Every structure is written in C-alpha cells, then in structure tokens.
Image (cartoon, rainbow, N blue to C red):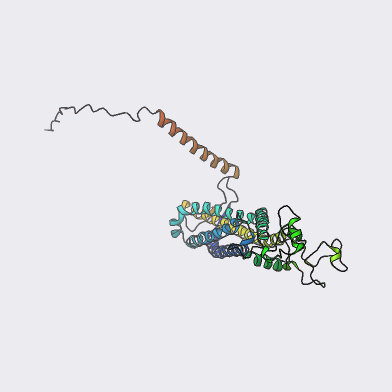
Amino acid sequence: MAVLRVKFTKTKRDKLAQILWILNWVSVVSGIILFSLGLFLKIEIKKRNEVMAKGDVNSVPNMLLSVGVIACIINFLGGKICYDCSDASKFSRWKLVMLPYIVCTFCFTFCILVGALMCYTMRNELEESLYLGLRDAIKFYKDTDIPGRCFLKKTVDMLQIGFKCCGNNGFRDWFEIQWVSARYLNMASKEVLDRLKSNVDGKFLVDGVPFSCCNPSSPRPCIQYQLTNNSAHYNYDFLTEELNIWVKGCREALLDYYTAIMRSIGIAALLIWLFELSVLIGVRYLQTAMKNVLLLGDLEGESDGWLLENSFVETAKYNISIIKNLGKANQISTVSGMNDPNIDVQNTNCGKTNVTTKSIPAAS
C-alpha cells in the first residue's frame, strides 16, 4: 500500500510543477546563503589562526562551502526538471533521470543536516585548539626579536583588548611564564638576579600581567604589577577587591564568540534543511504523479502520487533484500569461477572432418 497517496488532476500537477520551479530557485538562493555562511566562518577562524593549534576546526566551514555549491547545482537542475514537468511530452526525457535525481537530492539534504549538527558538536575541538594555540602564543609573547614569533606580542595584546580577556584560562597564567624579554632585564639589578635564581628554570617570573589586560573602565589606575602584594598598593586587597584587569580568560571569551556564531549558523542550516526536504517531497509527488499519467496513457486525466510505493517496512525489506542478493551474487560468481571445470581448459584441435554432402535432388 502506497504511503501518503494523493490524487492529482492535470491542473494540480501543473500548479505543483510551477510552485516547485519557483521553490527550486529559492533553494538556489539558500545554497548561496550556506556558501556565504561557510565563507564567513572560515574568515573568522582565519583571523585568529595564530592563537589556534592545527586541527579540524575548518571542517565545518569547508562542509558548508561544499554543500552550498552543490545546493546551487542540484536546485538549478531541479528547477529545469520541474519546469519541463508541466508538459507531459517534455517530462518523458526526464523520466529515467528523476528517480536518481531524487535519491541524490535526499543524500544531499542529509549532508545539510550533518553540517548543521556539526555546528553544535565542534565546540570540543575548537576549545582544545584554542587552549593549545593560546598556550603557545602566551609562551612566545616575549620573543619579539625572533623571526616567526615577533608578531605574537601584538596579536595577543590586540586579542586581550578586543575580547576583554586576560591569559588563557585567566590572568594568573601570566604568573607562570616569563613574558618579559631578557633584553629588557637589567642583569646588574639584584632584584632581577634574585628572581631568576628563585625558580629551577631560571625564568623571570612576576605576579604581573601585560598592559593589554587592564580594564579602561576601572576608576582606579591600572595595577598590573605585584597583583598579589597588598602592601605594594594603598587600600588594596587582591582577595576581596575586584581587580581592575580583565578576569575572564581569552579561551573562554573566544569560545563564547565562536559558539554564538556557530549556533546561529546551525539554526540557519537546519531551516534550510527543512526547506530543502519539503521541496524534495514535492518533487517526489510530482515524479510519481507524472509517471502514473504516462502509464495510464491519459495525459489529461487524474493520477495518483505518493511518497513511497509500498509501506516503510516493505520498502526497507525490499532494499535490504537487494543488498543481500548483490552480496550473494558476488559470492556465487567467485565460487563458481573457482570450481568451473571449463575454465582454463585448452581446446583440442581435432582437425577438419571432410564430410561429403549429398545434393538434394531438385524437384522435377
């Protein structure tokens, strides 16, 4: 029994074909939107590539770019097919193409759904990439005179100012690394030498942060050195007073920024997927209705259209049986090829046999 059977008159078939022609062109626009969203996300990731470790963070924008291009091609072809379906004589040339087209379009709409879901599952990969990238960027912050790293100081400073953040996980990350270059340290100073000797690695560690961590909205002048020393500042308690530097880590700030972008893109992709799926269902009805018209031979009469010719269970069993039969056919051909006694047997040339043919007497 057919699933969701609908009866179509010639007028309804023509109207359906016209509506689907328009919707396919709208789908072309939706493909351009998907491509644009993927391009936007790729550019945003590229902007902060210096603070991201190499990974699969570009998988989502690449997926959206590919799906957007394919959407434009498939829906352009779909618009041409639906336009010709308003004329039964023109439909005959698309008759053998429509079912493979519907199958390919179904696979394509599934890719849109995958792309939409990837926008929500990318957070973990992005968080790991940002953590490793920011860790290395902060580590090499002081290397302003080393080729390949000299740009990192500016990158980190602009990042902390723009996103109102400090450090990787927080401002205390700066306490654990030497972020002041050795060329700017006075080695004749006893304080500097004591700090270098105070740790096993011989690093100049201070409880301070770069200027880019300062919050300009704070009424108090920025305290960026000796943050944990209450006696170094008047009326100051670092445990109770809200610091005048950014407390939020840059990893969290960037993660929130990209998550908001991907959430919006994911919603847009889901809406486009639903739209594409509805167009595909309409094309399926049009294909079955036109096919039945040709079978009945009455181009002006009514015809049935359906989503599936049989029930879901029967369709699933039929497809599974086809797959199983293909597997069995493969096995049979392989086994028969191994055991066939007629394979690789040389033909024996017995020579020509001279047979005297008797002439058939002509009728008198």
Specify the quadrant that holds the N terminus.
Answer: top right
For residue 152, what is the image quadrant?
bottom right
The image position of residue 309, as x and y in percent, is 55, 47
Please state which of residues 203 and 162 is positioned toward the viewer in this rendering.
203
Specify the quadrant that holds the C terminus.
Answer: top left
The residue lying at 48 percent from left, 38 percent from top is 326
Please state which of residues 280 and 11 is positioned toward the viewer in this rendering.
280
Residue projecting furthest to the left: 364
Please state which of residues 157 and 232 is positioned toward the viewer in this rendering.
232
In this image, 156 relative to 287: left or right?
right
The image position of residue 262, as x and y in percent, is 66, 60
The image position of residue 70, as x and y in percent, is 52, 59
Is residue 361 positioned above or below 109 on the image? above
Residue projecting furthest to the right: 235
Is residue 334 positioned above or below 81 on the image? above
Q: How many marks?
A: 0
The image position of residue 158, as x and y in percent, is 67, 68
The residue lying at 57 percent from left, 45 percent from top is 310
The answer to whether residue 288 is visible is no
For residue 163, what is the image quadrant?
bottom right
The residue lying at 54 percent from left, 64 percent from top is 28
Please state which of residues 301 and 138 is positioned toward the viewer in this rendering.
138
The answer to whether residue 231 is visible is yes
